[in-house]
């Protein structure tokens, strides 16, 4: 159930904050002007969103803290932004817990699940009352009324009403989280259960108040760009993110103008991973394991770690394409800094833990960096081209089914039993994993992707995944090499990295 | 038939603020309105930071939303057609 993603008002708010924080960082004026930023942001945009400007400013302050990379911690409360800045510039909170609820921004949506609307006719039959197992429904002022203290939330009343007058309300954050990791607190504000959260970021997209947001590393990246040699690894879903459809040139030119020394596609790593993972499969299945899963999506890996710990050994030990490329770059140049840029929030934690990536950005944050530096990508004349070594199947990793397809290309020659399946979204992933546990599955390889549509549907994307998918397909049509086995560079790097390619 | 030029800014600032959504919203414009429009993508309308921006018949509109762009277009075309009332 892919829903069209729009640039809604809360999305604009977040992007304005990122842009303005980045602007100050580029200008080196964070210390002087950060305290004035909430006021400045308030004057931007036409609409007033909340009850009063004081609340809006309080929300802006929290968003600025997240943009600076600070988590929502008790110790940061009631402190001026300039007071927090020295601490923020040490980037203490980047290791985990990327997804944060902004408490002041959380509207505390209703927690009562069933609600009688005005469509209730107070009919004679009142099947709602008859069907309720707890006698929770009475008639008050000519309308059915649900006593929430008695309600079991079974939904019988809703199903029985001939007018459809009883509706089921789900808190958007809870509805968007397919693994039950976000719940209402006693004060009705949302709270994330970190034991369960896999950092997919679906709740960030789901919340219509924009009250859930990720921590950003924009300031760290800007500091790197000012002083260091910086390599960028870009996820294959980069295509079209800056508004240039399937033309990669302007994107590459923009990266150069930002100050990146070199841009490498993570798709190169995807080719390496496809080669490595297919060999791993041949070694392990069916001798050691009856099935194996992919390991490139950190949301999916977190899902197995936190919700299906018994299956950990079934997850491929091959590193993700991002880490493969980063390890290669670090081998080539020990000093250079490496920044991964993608649509993904969970990658921020994976990248940090890998020890080889120095910072991570989403495409949304990258675009804010460009706007803050007054780089207009539509005005750029670009002749840059992507590397011709990379295969179509490597670039295809960005879409659901892409890993499966890439491995298909290699495995079809093998005589082993190869029965792959792919799952997108945490619900589908969980279902497939459960079937694999029960031994009822006919498959022996599972590609798991936490986001609907795969990486192109990631929470940090600028463009709706449906369109990115189309641009990607057009780019792939122009890609000469078909499979990972056609990429000789990937084969060489794979040899060089050897056992470094395993976690 | 008079034609109204609709310029949608696709500069990076407007892109980040959702100029693509403005394009998409035009799909829902009634055909008899669309006939009047010449839609072009422009790289900048000089009002970065107030986006997404459009220029319709030479007049610039800032902070556009998919909802508002349709209203503005309908209003301007109704004026062109004359006779009929605006919104």
Image: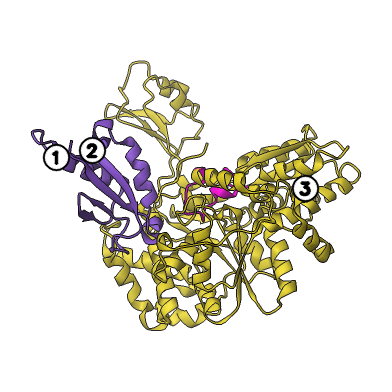
Chain identity of mark 2? B
Q: Tell which of A210 and A468 is nearer to you.
A: A468
Mark positioned earlier in the residue sequence (2 or 1): 2
Is the magenta region chiefly helix, strand or loop? loop
Which percent across, then down, holds residue A356? 69, 70
Q: Is residue A127 left or right of residue B76?
A: right
- Mark 3 or mark 1, which is nearer to you? 1
Q: Which residue is disc 2 drawn over?
A: B36
Q: Which mark is residue A347?
A: none
Question: Disc 3 designates what residue?
Answer: A311
Q: Is residue A104 visible?
A: no
**Are the numbered discs 3 and 1 placed on the same chain, yes or no?**
no
Crowding near the residue tagged with mark 2, few <14, some 14–19, many ≥20 C-alpha atoms within 10 Å: some
User: Is residue A207 found inside the magenta-colored segment of the image?
Assistant: no
Query: Which color scheme does this rendered protein use?
Result: by chain
Q: Colour of chain B?
A: purple
Q: Position of residue A52 (x, y in %)?
A: 26, 61
Say which quarter of the image contains residue A260.
bottom right
Q: Which residue does the numbered mark 1 point to in the structure image?
A: B80
Label 2 vs label 1: CA separation?
9 Å
Q: Is residue A459 located in the magenta-colored stretch of the structure? A: yes
Rendered-image quadrant of the C terminus of chain A: bottom right
For mark 1, give the secondary structure: helix
C-beta proximity under 8 Å, tags 2 and 1: yes
The residue drawn where x is 67% and y is 37% is A431
Front label number (2 vs 3): 2
């Amino acid at each position: 159930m892919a829903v069209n993603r729009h640039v809604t008002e809360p999305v604009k708010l977040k992007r304005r904050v990122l842009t303005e924080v980045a602007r100050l960082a580029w200008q080196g004026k964070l210390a002087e002007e950060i305290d004035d930023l909430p006021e400045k942001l308030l004057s931007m945009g036409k609409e007033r969103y909340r009850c009063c400007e004081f609340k809006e400013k309080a929300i802006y302050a929290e968003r600025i803290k997240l943009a600076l990379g600070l988590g929502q911690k008790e110790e940061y409360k009631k402190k001026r932004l300039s007071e927090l800045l020295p601490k923020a510039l040490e980037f203490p909170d980047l290791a985990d817990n990327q997804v944060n609820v902004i408490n002041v921004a959380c509207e505390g949506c209703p927690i009562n699940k069933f609600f009688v609307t005005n469509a209730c006719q107070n009919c004679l039959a009142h099947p709602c009352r008859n069907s309720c197992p707890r006698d929770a429904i009475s008639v008050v002022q000519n309308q059915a009324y649900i006593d929430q203290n008695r309600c079991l939330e079974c939904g019988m009343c809703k199903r029985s009403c001939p007018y459809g007058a009883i509706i089921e309300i789900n808190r958007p954050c809870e509805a968007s989280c397919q693994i039950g990791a976000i719940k209402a607190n006693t004060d009705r504000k949302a709270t994330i259960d970190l034991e369960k959260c896999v950092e997919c970021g679906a709740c960030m997209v789901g919340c219509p108040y924009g009250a859930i947001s990720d921590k950003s590393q924009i300031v760290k990246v800007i500091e790197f760009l000012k002083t260091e040699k910086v390599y960028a690894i870009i996820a294959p879903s980069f295509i079209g993110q800056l508004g240039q459809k399937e033309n990669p040139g302007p994107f590459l030119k923009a990266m150069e103008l930002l100050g990146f020394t070199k841009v490498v596609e993570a798709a190169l790593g995807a080719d390496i991973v496809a080669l490595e993972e297919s060999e791993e499969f041949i070694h392990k299945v069916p001798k050691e394991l009856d099935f194996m899963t992919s390991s490139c999506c950190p949301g999916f890996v977190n899902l197995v770690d936190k919700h299906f710990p018994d299956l950990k050994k079934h997850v491929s030990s091959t590193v993700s394409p991002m880490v493969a490329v980063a390890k290669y770059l670090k081998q080539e140049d020990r000093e250079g800094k490496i920044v991964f840029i993608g649509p993904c929030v969970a990658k921020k934690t994976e990248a940090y833990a890998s020890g080889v990536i120095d910072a991570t950005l989403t495409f949304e944050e990258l675009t804010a960096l460009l706007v803050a530096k007054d780089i207009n990508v539509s005005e750029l004349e670009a002749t840059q081209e992507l590397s011709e070594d990379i295969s179509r199947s490597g670039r295809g990793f960005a879409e659901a089914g892409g890993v499966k397809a890439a491995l298909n290309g290699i495995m079809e020659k093998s005589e082993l039993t190869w029965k792959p399946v792919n799952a997108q979204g945490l619900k589908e992933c969980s279902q497939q994993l459960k079937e694999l546990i029960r031994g009822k599955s006919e498959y022996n390889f599972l590609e798991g992707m936490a986001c609907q549509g795969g990486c192109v549907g990631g929470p940090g994307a600028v463009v709706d995944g449906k369109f990115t998918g189309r641009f990607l397909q057009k780019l792939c049509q122009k890609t000469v090499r078909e499979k990972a086995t056609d990429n000789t560079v990937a084969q060489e790097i794979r040899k060089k990295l050897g056992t470094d390619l395993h976690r | 038939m008079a034609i109204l030029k609709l310029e949608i800014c696709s500069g990076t600032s407007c892109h980040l603020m959702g100029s693509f959504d403005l394009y998409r919203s035009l799909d829902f414009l009634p055909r008899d309105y669309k006939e009047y429009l010449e839609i072009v993508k422009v790289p900048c309308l000089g009002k970065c930071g107030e986006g997404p921006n459009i220029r319709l018949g030479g007049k610039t509109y800032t902070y556009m939303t998919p909802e508002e762009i349709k209203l503005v277009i309908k209003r301007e075309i109704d004026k062109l057609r004359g006779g009929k009332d605006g919104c």
